[in-house]
Image: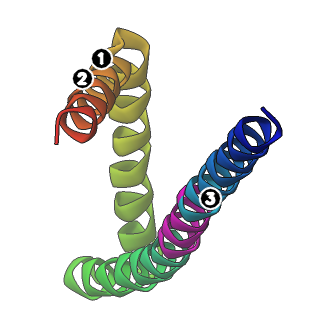
Amino acid sequence: MNSLIDKIISLIKIKGDQVKLELISKFSTFLAVSILFLTMVILSLLMLIFLSLGIAVIFNEFFMSAYWGYFIASAFFFLMIIMVLWIARSGKIQNWLEEVIIESSYKKNHE
């Protein structure tokens, strides 16, 4: 009887270790993806800043003005902000994310 209890206890310990390793694996994957995403966001913002400054300077030279290019670039980003807010309020992003999460979890569970 004692050997049966010892086997059950060792099985529970093995399952606990297995769950712990799965959690570590999932957390490390999440952390790696988060770091990659944050790095890409920062680099993309830097690229966008310098690109917009370059385009604004080109517009300045085209209009022979010291400031119109910056106004045009700012107006473009203002329109982009309005579009993003409109899309966010419509719920399209949330619906799309829900579909992606459901599909990915369904695929992982059935592989």
Label for residue 99? Answer: 2
Would you call the spot at circle 2 few (<14 residues within 10 Å), some (14-19), or many (20 or more)?
A: few
What is the three-letter code of the residue carrying label 3? Answer: Phe
Q: Give the range drawn in magenta.
A: 26-38
Would you call the spot at circle 1 few (<14 residues within 10 Å), some (14-19), or many (20 or more)?
A: few
In the rendered image, which quarter contains the N terminus? top right
Q: Name the residue under label 1.
A: 95
Queried whether the magenta region covers residue 39, the answer comes back as no
Q: Nearer the viewer, mark 2 or mark 3?
A: 3
Q: Nearer the N terminus, badge 2 or badge 3? A: 3
- Residue 37 position (above or below residue 43): above
Q: Quadrant of residue 96?
A: top left
Q: Mark 3 points at which residue?
A: 27
Question: CB of mark 1 within 8 Å of CB of mark 3?
Answer: no
- Residue 81 position (above or below residue 98): below
Question: CB of mark 2 within 8 Å of CB of mark 1?
Answer: yes
Q: How many marks?
A: 3
In the rendered image, which quarter contains the C terminus? top left
